[in-house]
Image (cartoon, rainbow, N blue to C red):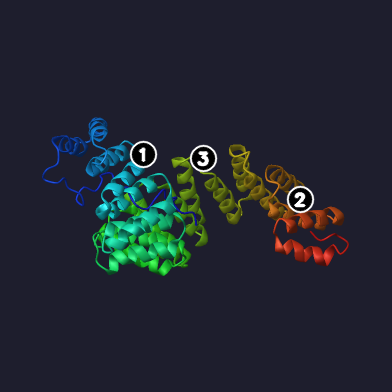
Amino acid sequence: MKKRIQQGIFTVMTGLVFSSFSLAQNSSVGLKSAEELINRGDYMQALIKLDSIISKSHDNAEAYYYLGTAKASLGDCGGAIETWDNYARLDQENSWKINILKADCYARQGQHEEAIDALSKYLVHDPYHGHSYMLRGQEYYLMSKYALAVQDFSMVINRKLEGHTNFEVYYKRGLAYSEFGMNKDAVSDFTKVIELYPQFNYGYFYRGSCQYHLGKIDLAIADFTKSIELDGKDLHSYFNRGLCYKEERELDLAITDFSKVIQLDVNFDEAYNQIAMTLYYKGDFAAAERSFNEYITKFSNYSHAYFNRGMFYAERKNNTKALADFDHCIQLNAKDADAYFHKALILQEQKKNALACESLVKAEELGNAEAGLIRKRSCAASPKP
């Protein structure tokens, strides 16, 4: 089941946290002016003003705080972190509060471990800060540490922290559950997402994906259909619904959905393959071959395109064309164990045992265990890989 690729499961903070820090009553007019500039988004002017303040007073902690904020807002996260470290050195009592801002910068730069470390340090001092658990859960998710991601999202929900009534926390935990293979729990979370935000098509899409993995194909079709109703250009919902229809032997409906995917994205290569395979299942072999040929023409550099057409020819007992496709697949991807394996089966059928054994050895070397079993039975004189 192809799933939508997620670039991230948490929207990075666009505004920085000011509530934990406030200017002292005797703060200079310059600092207040810099704060106002930052609040209205004039970060470059704020940076210029703050640089001037710091050049006159190197021990002004708040100036370093706001300067870091301006740098981060301008995209200079490395400079922001260095500047905030100066703030922490000057105001050690409040230095821990900077960690949440540093974490945001680390996250933007893809430094997931550093972001997690900074958030963990922040949470030591503020263990009920829901946003920090959400952001740390996101970073765990991006590092494929799904159990830890679930733990952080659950902390927000179970402790009823800030954001616990929002659909995002259930959505993120549902994604983590599904990646962890806990599809029943994921379905429960996506159902909650739909309850809280019924117009959010991704909730239906991901619940449908989990229902598919649970073998509940009719429920999956219903969810993908609802996702399509909410977003008629959601090609992944069409594709996944097509897979469901194919499994249910509703082959014409499957072809219609795969064709819609191509209409939405002419470069979605797997849709071409699925159309060809579905036509084959229908028994329309001539149309299936034309579709495989179209697939090859469109994606002539894709080794798996040749492999798939080779499998079609092998099933049709057109061994000459099948061998040609498997050889072409191997030319494009010399590590395709399955291509060597199926080539070997055809060579065995043709009584070309020496060549078959060479291919079996190669397939076994590349990790095809079945090739090794066949080699032991039929290629006694062949060297082990």
Element marked by disc 3: loop
Find residue 217 and report its horizontal and vertical position in percent: 45, 64
Q: Is residue 307 left or right of residue 378?
A: left
Name the image quarter holding the C terminus.
bottom right
Sooner in the amino-acid sequence: mark 3 or mark 1 = 1
Residue 91 location, x and y as percent?
25, 50
27 or 237: which is nearer to us?
27
For the residues carrying marks 3 and 1, which lies nearer the camera in this image? Answer: 1
User: In the rendering, at what x and y percent does residue 198 appear?
Assistant: 27, 57
For marks 2 and 1 on the same chain, the one whose residue lies earlier in the sequence: 1
Q: Earlier in the sequence, mark 2 or mark 3?
A: 3
Residue drawn at point x = 82 percent, y = 54 percent: 358
Q: Is residue 191 left or right of residue 18?
A: right
Which amino acid type is shown beneath numbered disc 2?
Answer: Asn
Element carrying mark 2: helix
Name which residue lies at 26% across and 68% down: 159
- In the picture of the structure, the residue carrying the numbered disc 2 is 319
Measured Cα–Cα span from mark 3 to mark 1: 41 Å
Q: Is residue 41 above or below residue 361?
A: above
Snapshot quadrant of residue 205: bottom left
Position of residue 322 relative to residue 176, above or below, is above
- Label drawn at residue 79: 1
